[in-house]
Amino acid sequence: MMKVIELKRTVTDSNDRDAAQLRANLKRRGIFLLNLMSAPGSGKTTLLSRTIRDLAEKVNIGVMEADIASSVDAAKIHALGAESIQMHTDGMCHVDAGMTRAGIDALAALRSEIVFLENIGNLICPAEFDTGAHKNVMILSLPEGDDKPLKYPLMFQKSDALLITKMDAAPYFDFDLDAAVRRVKALNPSIRIFPVSAKTGLGMDAWESWLLAQWEEWKHA
Amino acid sequence: MMKVIELKRTVTDSNDRDAAQLRANLKRRGIFLLNLMSAPGSGKTTLLSRTIRDLAEKVNIGVMEADIASSVDAAKIHALGAESIQMHTDGMCHVDAGMTRAGIDALAALRSEIVFLENIGNLICPAEFDTGAHKNVMILSLPEGDDKPLKYPLMFQKSDALLITKMDAAPYFDFDLDAAVRRVKALNPSIRIFPVSAKTGLGMDAWESWLLAQWEEWKHA
C-alpha cells in the first residue's frame, strides 16, 4: 500500500505551533515583534529608517532584513546605529517562525524593545506563514496602484495596519486614495490605514503614535 | 526503510519537458509567446495596452493575464479589442508550462500572432519556472529603486529584455539609471534594456521595434 504524506498540512501545523511558542517567548523577553510585508521597492527600509530616527529618544528599534540575496538594507539600518541583521532565505519567498526565531537569536545585543521583521518583497507567499510576530503591518506604495487589494486580498486581510507610502508622488500617478481605502476596508474592516511620505514626513506622526500605543498595550496585556 | 520522494526535482524535470514541447507546438501554430514578469504594480498592463494600440496595424497581440484573484487586467485588455483571458493560479505565485498551455488552449479565436503571458506580480517564484515562452521580458518600474538587481538577481539573469517603466516619474525619485543598467549588465551582459514611459510614449519606439524584430527572426528561424 502506498503511503501518502500530507507535507503541506504538516508543515503549516508545525509552523503555527512554532509561531505561537515564539510569540510567547518574545513576550517573556520583552521584545515586541512586527512583521512588515510589501511588494519589492515599496519603501520598507526608507520607512523604517525614518521611524527609527523619529523615535530614537523613546524606544530602541531593531530590524531583521529578509532577502533572497544582498545585504544592502541591513547596512542602511546599521548605519543609523540600530541593531540589524540580514537573513538570506535560500531562494524561498517567505519567512516562517523557525527562520524568525533564528533571526532573533542572531540579533547580537538584543537591547531592542521593538523589532521589525522586514519580510521578503512579495505580496503573496509571506501572507501565508505566521512568523510569530505580535502584529502584521503591510505597505502599499502609491505607484503600485489602487487596484492591489483586488489582486492580492490575503495580505490585506492578515494585516493590522496598512501604510500607503510615497504619498508625495501623488501628482505623478492616478492613484484613487478613497477607492484604495474602500477596497481595503471591504477585505478587513478593522485595519488601520496610514497614508505617509517618509521623504516629506507627511502622516509619520499618526503611524508612529499608533506603533507606540500598540507597544504600550502589548506590554501591559 | 523510509522512502524519500524528491518532489521538487521531479516537478522541475517534467516542467522543463512540458515547456520545450509547448514551445515547439506554438512554433508550428505560428504563435510567438513572451513571458512578461515583474513586481506587483510595475505597469505591466499599461505597457501592454500601449504596445497593443501602437502596433495594431502591424500585428495582432493577445494577452493571458495570470493572477491570484480578480480579472481587472483582462477586462482592460479586452476593452482594447485584443484577445485576452484571465488565469487564476489558486494562490500559487508562479505559472508553469502546463498552466500556460491551458491558457493558450482557452484563448478563444487564436487570431493572435504574438501572445504575452502577463505573469504573477512577483520578482521571485516566476523566474524559477520555464513557461514555454520563446522570450522572457522583465519590467522594473522606476519607483521600485535601482537596487533591485542586487536583491532579485535570478529574474534579471533569465530575461532577454528589461523595460524600465514610469520614466516620466524620474523627477520624483532618486533612481540612478546608470547604476541600474550597470548592475543588470553585470548579471546578464546580453540583456536589452529599454527605459520607457507608457504614459508619455518615451522610448516605446525602441521597445516595439525590438519586439517586431524578435518576432520576424523567430518566424524565419
Image: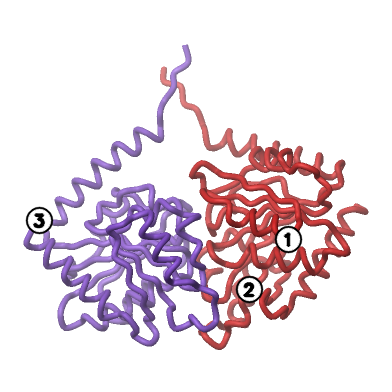
Chain colours: A red, B purple
- Asked if labels 2 and 3 touch by Cβ distance under 8 angstroms, the answer is no
Describe residue A131's horizontal placement relative to residue A153 as left or right.
right
Q: Which residue is mark 1?
A: A80
Q: Secondary structure at mark 1?
A: loop
Q: Chain of mark 3?
A: B
Looking at the rendered structure, the kind of residue marked 2 is Thr
Number of numbered callouts drawn: 3
**Residue at x 53%, y 56% (from the top left corner):** A124
Quadrant assignment, res A175:
bottom right
Q: Residues within 10 Å of mark 1 (few under 14, many from 20)?
A: some
Task: Judge depth for marks 2 and 1 and give the one in front.
Answer: 1
Are discs 3 and 2 located on one and the same chain? no
Looking at the rendered structure, the kind of residue marked 1 is Leu
- Image: A12 above or below B200: above
Are discs 3 and 1 located on one and the same chain? no
Expressed as whole percent of the image width and height from the top left, the position of residue B44 reads 39, 71
Q: Which residue is mark 2?
A: A165
Describe residue A152's horizontal placement relative to residue A82 as left or right.
left
